[in-house]
Image (cartoon, rainbow, N blue to C red):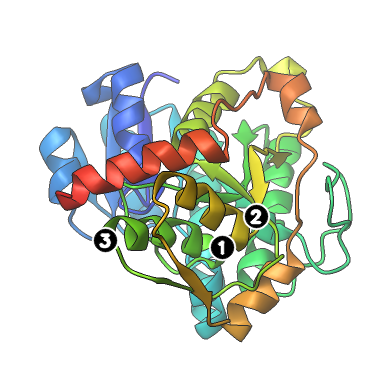
Amino acid sequence: MKKILVLGAGGQIGSELVPHLRKVYGVDNVIAADLKPNPVLAAAGPFETADATDANAIATLAKKYKVDTLFNLVALLSALGEQRPEFAWQLNMGALLNTLNVAKELGCAVFTPSSIGAFGNNTPKDKTPQDTIMRPNTMYGVCKVSGELLSDYYHSRFGVDTRSVRFPGIISYVTLPGGGTTDYAVEIYYAAVKGEEFVCPIPQGVYMDMMYMPDALDGIVQLMEADPSKLQHRNSFNVASMSFAPEEICAAIQKELPSFRMRYEVDPVRESIARSWPNSLDDSCARAEWGWSPKWDLTSMTRDMLAQVAKKLGK
């Protein structure tokens, strides 16, 4: 990667990936693009307003900046996708198809995040294998499975260098949650720092895979720089870091803030989605094929999140 265009740069991943990529590859070599203006990203480097469902807009930017890599981060997340399933399909798949076609035309590599949402109720729950049953029951999941297949097709049929990871819930203090099922694991830290009781929408005992954003950013760069001859799976790799239930993240916070309290007020939609996802992933293929090795666990992440959120809120 030398010149990178990031589509959907204003979202949870993009807002942190763009600064990370700019540190690694240089400010002028990472172009951020989003449907909405983003003063923060624009002040720090090249920024363009663009609609990723418009193939011409993507192609125009890719040609203007002579990019060699496209990051497609455009997506309507899981819980929001259930409210607007038709729009979720049009947005998620439209942006991906446009990205792949531009990459085919211009010879660009493509990164698109997949998700644990690609799995469903029939998937083995514990240590979910790299290659397994994928029958999701959410529009978000349907889009992710379709996206994996489409990306592999463009690689095998047209030679496009497509790469992807199945992200678990990503925890970050920089961008507020955006309608995902794992958002509670971000919101809980804000409540703790504010001294508020946290109302948890996910039931006790429901495990989901999670990851701290610094590991996610490092993993993306590591995969995109990996030797292509060693990549057997491409779209998409399981990546795992930590797996916990609400009571465990609560206990981790209480070790640092003993007065913190949490109660349950379960959201049936989010509970249904959460129960359809794996408890934990087997990421041995990512470790073997491109050296995936996360650095953060629940304890270290909790300490850092509490410190960073406190700094952000002026506490």
The reply to whether residue 108 is visible in this rendering is no
* Identity of the residue drawn at 48% across and 58% down: 95
Extreme residue toward the front, this view: 258
Q: Distance between the residues labelled 2 and 3?
A: 39 Å
Which element type, helix, strand or loop, lies under badge 1? helix
Mark 1 to mark 3: distance in Å? Answer: 38 Å
x then y, percent, for residue 208:
67, 56
Asked if 225 appears above or below 157 in the picture, the reply is above
Disc 1 and disc 2 in contact, CB within 8 angstroms:
yes
* Residue on which disc 2 sits: 147
Q: In which quarter of the image is residue 189?
A: bottom left
User: Is label 3 in a helix, a strand or a loop?
Assistant: helix
Front position in the image: 95 or 277: 277
| Labelled pair 1, 3 in contact (Cβ < 8 Å) | no
Which secondary structure lies at badge 2?
helix
Q: Quadrant of residue 15?
A: top left
Q: What's the residue type where badge 3 is placed?
A: Lys
Residue 14 picture location, percent across and down? 37, 45
Residue at horizontal 67 percent and vertical 47 percent from the top? 243
* Residue that carries the numbered disc 1 in the rendered image: 93
Whichever of labels 1 and 3 marks the residue nearer the N terminus, that label is 1
Q: For the N terminus, which image quadrant?
A: top left
**Residue tagged 3:** 194
| First in residue order: circle 2 vs circle 3 | 2
Residue at 71% from the left image edge and 65% from the top image edge: 205
Instruction: Name the spot of residue 210 as percent of width and height, x first.
Output: 59, 48
Looking at this view, is 131 or 292 the one in front?
Answer: 292
Residue 297 in percent (x, y) is at 57, 35
Image position of 42 with respect to 85: above or below: above
